[in-house]
Image: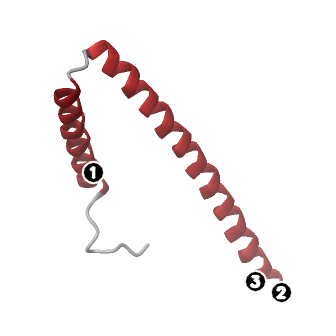
Amino acid sequence: MSENKNQKPLSVMMENAKAMMIASFNQVQAETALPAYLMEGIVLDLLAQVRNQKNLELVSDYNKMQVQDEKKGEKIDG
């Protein structure tokens, strides 16, 4: 498996993304002065959107794998 040596480790990318999201959340909360119980509803909606995107990506990845497997089968057969 070849790995891009310039690419950051996934754990570092995740921590950076988390820090950015927390900073953004804190900024929005400060600017809107919404109470936590209302912010919770917004965060839950965002989570639902992320889950939907994740599911779409998963289906796309499965489809790509299937196409690659079919191409490999064609090369072996013919």
Label 1 or label 3, whichever lies nearer to me, is 1
The residue furthest front is 32
Circle 3: element type: helix
Q: Indicate whether 12 appears above or below 64.
A: above
Determine whether label 2 and label 3 are within 8 Å by CB: yes
Query: What's the mark number on residue 69?
Result: none
Query: What's the mark number on residue 11?
Result: 1
Quarter occupied by the N terminus: bottom left
Q: Earlier in the sequence, mark 2 or mark 1?
A: 1
State which quadrant residue 64 falls in. bottom right
Instruction: Return the residue at label 2.
Output: 78
Residue drawn at (25%, 63%), measured in percent from left and top? 8
How many marks the image carries: the answer is: 3
* Mark 1: amino acid: Ser
CA distance for labels 2 and 1: 42 Å
Instruction: Return the residue at label 3.
Output: 75
State which quadrant residue 67 falls in. bottom right
* Mark 2: amino acid: Gly
> Residue 31 versus residue 63: which sits nearer the camera?
31
Looking at the picture, how far across and down is residue 72, in whole percent?
71, 76
